[in-house]
Image: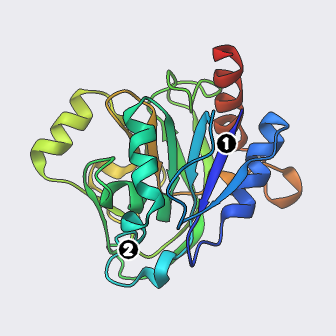
Amino acid sequence: MKAAIVHFPGTNRERDMAIALRQASGQRPQMVWHRETELPQGLDLVVLPGGFSYGDYLRCGAMAAQSPVMGAVRDFAAKGGHVLGVCNGFQMLTEAGLLPGALLRNATLRFLAMDCTMKVERADTAYTRHFQPGQRFRATMAHGDGNYFADDATIERLEGANRVVFRYDDANLNGSRNAIAGICSENGRVLGLMPHPENCVDPLVGGEDGLPLFLSLAESFAEAG
């Protein structure tokens, strides 16, 4: 699996993501600075990791979505490339127009830093094939703006097209519509989710609940050649 992780000013989860990807595939991902205008050749996956890009000024992810590298990320996605955005990365995907909706301030108006339980709604994507449909797994929330919102028509389209990949199962503390924790693009290759599966890939630091996501990717790309 040849992956690249895009690093913005304020990103702080790139090393956690790199560990998860390397643990699943045995290959070290490349780091790409946000001012680059091109991505490395031959990539299978681009990751927009969590953190506080540009200090979350303006709107979370809004400034990062205008960074030079995002043009290349859009082109990569348009050509069928896989793009994973986690937490701040999910916010970037919505701000860049790669996924619909927006991430608003948590309903509690408080930063949420705790474990949560997610339910797998789809196990037929490159990100979820190591899960079972309906499987519940633990991940870590660390966000102040994770309240997924879209208008009624968009929510209806997402639900009707089976594009909700993950849903909060134990409690919907951030107030996301329909308890949505993660959605994908029409072709299933762009995925955004708020909780951090990369924080749960090693029993020494809290368990391996999130590892199936990264094993799914590694297996999918290995089969693709």
- Residue 31 lies in what quarter of the image? bottom right
- Foreground residue, 132 or 69? 69
Disc 2: which residue: 63
Residue 65: percent from left, percent from top: 38, 64
Q: Are dots 2 and 1 in contact, CB under 8 Å? A: no
Residue located 66% across and 66% down the image: 13
10 Å neighbourhood of mark 1: few (<14), some, or many (≥20)? Answer: many
Mark yes or no: residue 107 visible.
Answer: yes
Image side of residue 180 versus residue 113, left or right:
left
Mark drawn on residue 3? 1
The type of residue carrying mark 2 is Met
- Foreground residue, 57 or 215? 57
Residue 209: percent from left, percent from top: 70, 44
- Specify which label sits upstream in the sequence, 2 or 1: 1
10 Å neighbourhood of mark 2: few (<14), some, or many (≥20)? Answer: some
**The N terminus: image quadrant:** top right
Q: Is residue 223 above or below residue 202?
A: above
Mark yes or no: residue 165 visible.
Answer: no
Image side of residue 171 versus residue 205, left or right:
left
- Residue 116 lies in what quarter of the image? bottom right
Residue located 59% across and 72% down the image: 11
**The C terminus: image quadrant:** top right
Instruction: Determine the secondary structure under disc 1.
Output: strand
Residue located 73% across and 60% down the image: 16
Instruction: Determine the secondary structure under disc 2.
Output: loop
Q: How many marks?
A: 2
